[in-house]
Image (cartoon, helix red, strand yellow):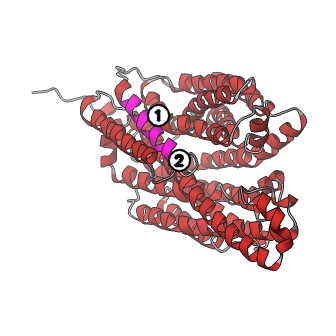
């Protein structure tokens, strides 16, 4: 494909990726209103988020495998249709139960879009040329991350929360039409053998694990019979899935032979650790700005520009230089060093940290993530065969999402525990010097309220607790980033190939197969 043809097809793919990313960010500010309107509970609030995450993470490798077996263009369009159906149901949902079910359907579509876009790009463009297009992906990521909360807040305040789900439908329809007109990929005819048992066990095992990490500490104690049953069940089902993939399936969802490749194995380890460190810590920055800095959701959303801006700049620059030189490992190593530096700087923040300091720290983290995330997938795509491109690419995305889900739950539990302890200690000290606040304290100890409604001394206690706890979770995330750096250091640099197919695949096409004796 020419540069112009790639850009035309890429426009449809990026629209699809934008609508997938927007679906998670646009509802963030609307959730309290949604739960109130549908008379939901705190459990329902949690499940509106968890349902999409479960469906997306668990089905990512299955979509990737389908990309190796079926028409990729048809698969992307199918994912758009599934996402649109889920959005329509969510927009008209009469109850929390229907909304949660609709979010599962949305998650199925989002899982397909996030997995397939990377695979289709890998099919169109050689690894050497792919870097020049990674900046566009970074720009879409930045736009969806920044605009989602802002657009969601405006829609809730003007036309109602249901439009947060309807808003993505025109973009999805446009993406479908653009892909139909511009994306023309060769369809490779293969004998298709779908591994239904392996797919079922994989989705089941991962779903049980994610239910445990998402709801542990909220709906049940981490140390409880429920927790034990979920952990043992998850391990048993995942072990059964591995057995099926290794010994039973003719065409496994996740071909285990891929892990013989050192680059893919190390990139998978790094992806899990980056997921824990990045998603697990940065997702709570919005909470920090709203609780420790008394900012509105819109203002907190604007602060994310600092990190997203750094991510955008480094992904564009690193992508273009990698395309020019063919060398990528120095960017992975440098990116991980910047991630570690950013996390280290953010671990020093508290309620009194000036906003411009926090903004610079976030920009450093963003610079590191921009040079790491896309290029880690690029390193894997450079070493695996085209026939396994879907499965290999989705494995990295799958483990990054899995690490992120675990990180969000685990670091969220750390944050909640530390905030509760700090608030308890702070309120006890406050009452010794200001006994007149006894009644106000009695009303606040049951939860974490809106700090803007509190008397100044009481507000200071909560702001300090959230500020200190947020800095602490970045410190907890730091060892995971160090582990990712070690994994990256051991990845062997292979110069980026200039063809979509690997050299052995090209030789097999040129040389006729020698007759069997």
Query: Which residue has dot 2 on it?
Result: 220
- Dominant SS type (magenta): helix
User: Would you say residue 323 is visible in this rendering?
Assistant: no
Q: Mark 2, mark 1: which one is toward the viewer?
A: 2
- Residue 203 lies in the magenta stretch: yes
Residue 318 versus residue 212 in the image, above or below: below
Residue 375 tag number: none
**Secondary structure beneath disc 2?**
loop
Dot 1: few (<14), some (14–19), or many (≥20) neighbours within 10 Å? Answer: many
Query: Which residue has dot 1 on it?
Result: 64
Asked if residue 226 lies left or right of residue 462, the reply is left
Q: Which one is nearer the viewer's eye here, 193 or 444?
A: 444
The quadrant of the image that shows the N terminus is top right
- Residue 449 lies in the magenta stretch: no
Q: Residue at x 35, y 26 (%)?
A: 197
Dot 2: few (<14), some (14–19), or many (≥20) neighbours within 10 Å? Answer: few
Give x and y (percent) for residue 440. Answer: 83, 63
Q: Magenta segment range?
A: 198-213
Asked if residue 462 lies left or right of residue 239, the reply is right
Residue 241 versus residue 515 in the image, above or below: below
Mark found first going from the N terminus, 2 or 1: 1
Give x and y (percent) for residue 364. Answer: 66, 67
Give x and y (percent) for residue 225. Answer: 42, 46
Q: Among all residues in the image, which is located at the extreme bottom?
A: 433
The number of callouts visible is 2
Q: Which one is nearer the viewer's eye here, 498 or 197?
A: 197
**Secondary structure beneath disc 1?**
helix
C-alpha separation, residue under disc 2 versus residue under disc 1: 34 Å
Give x and y (percent) for residue 18. Answer: 68, 38
Snapshot quadrant of residue 118: top right
Q: Which one is nearer the viewer's eye here, 162 or 382?
A: 162
């Amino acid at each position: 494909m020419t540069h112009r043809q790639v850009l035309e097809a890429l426009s449809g793919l990026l629209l699809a990726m934008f609508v997938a990313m927007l679906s998670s960010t646009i509802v963030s500010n609307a959730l309290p209103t949604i739960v109130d309107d549908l008379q939901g509970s705190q459990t329902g609030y949690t499940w509106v988020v968890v349902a999409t995450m479960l469906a997306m993470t668990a089905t990512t490798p299955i979509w990737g495998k389908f990309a190796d077996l079926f028409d990729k263009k048809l698969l992307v369009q199918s994912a758009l249709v599934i996402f649109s159906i889920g959005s329509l149901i969510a927009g008209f949902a009469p109850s929390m139960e229907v909304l949660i079910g609709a979010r599962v359907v949305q998650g199925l579509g989002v899982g397909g879009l996030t997995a397939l876009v990377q695979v289709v790009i890998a099919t169109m463009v050689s690894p050497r040329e792919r870097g020049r297009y990674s900046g566009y992906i970074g720009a879409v990521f930045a736009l969806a991350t920044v605009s989602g909360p802002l657009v969601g807040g405006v829609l809730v305040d003007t036309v109602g929360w249901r439009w947060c789900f309807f808003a993505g439908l025109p973009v999805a329809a446009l993406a479908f039409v653009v892909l139909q007109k511009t994306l023309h990929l060769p369809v490779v005819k293969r004998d298709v053998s779908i591994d239904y048992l392996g797919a079922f066990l994989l989705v089941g095992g991962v779903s049980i694990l994610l239910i445990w990490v998402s709801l542990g500490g909220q709906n049940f104690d981490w140390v409880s019979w429920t927790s034990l049953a979920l952990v043992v069940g998850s391990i048993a089902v995942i072990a059964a899935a591995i057995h099926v993939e290794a010994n039973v399936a003719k065409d496994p969802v996740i071909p285990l032979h891929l892990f013989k490749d050192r680059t893919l194995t190390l990139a998978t380890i790094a992806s899990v650790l980056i997921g824990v460190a990045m998603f697990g810590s940065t997702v709570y920055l919005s909470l920090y700005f709203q609780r420790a800095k008394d900012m509105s959701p819109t203002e907190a959303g604007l602060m994310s520009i600092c990190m997203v801006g750094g991510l955008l700049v480094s992904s564009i620059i690193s992508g273009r230089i990698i395309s020019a030189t063919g060398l990528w490992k120095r960017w992975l190593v440098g990116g991980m060093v910047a991630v570690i530096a950013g996390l280290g700087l953010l671990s020093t923040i508290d309620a009194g940290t000036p906003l411009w300091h926090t903004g610079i720290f976030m920009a450093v983290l963003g610079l590191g993530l921009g040079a790491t995330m896309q290029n880690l997938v690029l390193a894997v795509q450079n070493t695996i065969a085209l026939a396994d491109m879907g499965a290999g690419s989705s494995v990295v995305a799958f483990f990054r999402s899995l690490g992120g889900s675990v990180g969000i739950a685990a670091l969220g539990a750390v944050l909640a525990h530390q905030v509760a302890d700090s608030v308890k200690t702070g309120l006890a000290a406050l009452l010794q010097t200001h006994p007149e606040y006894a009644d106000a304290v009695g009303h606040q100890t049951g939860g974490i309220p809106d700090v803007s409604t509190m008397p100044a001394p009481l507000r200071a206690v909560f702001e300090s607790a959230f500020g200190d706890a947020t800095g602490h979770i970045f410190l907890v995330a730091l060892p995971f980033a160090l582990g990712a750096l070690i994994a990256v250091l051991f990845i062997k640099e292979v110069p980026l190939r200039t063809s979509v197919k690997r050299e052995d695949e090209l030789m097999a096409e040129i040389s006729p197969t020698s007759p069997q004796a």
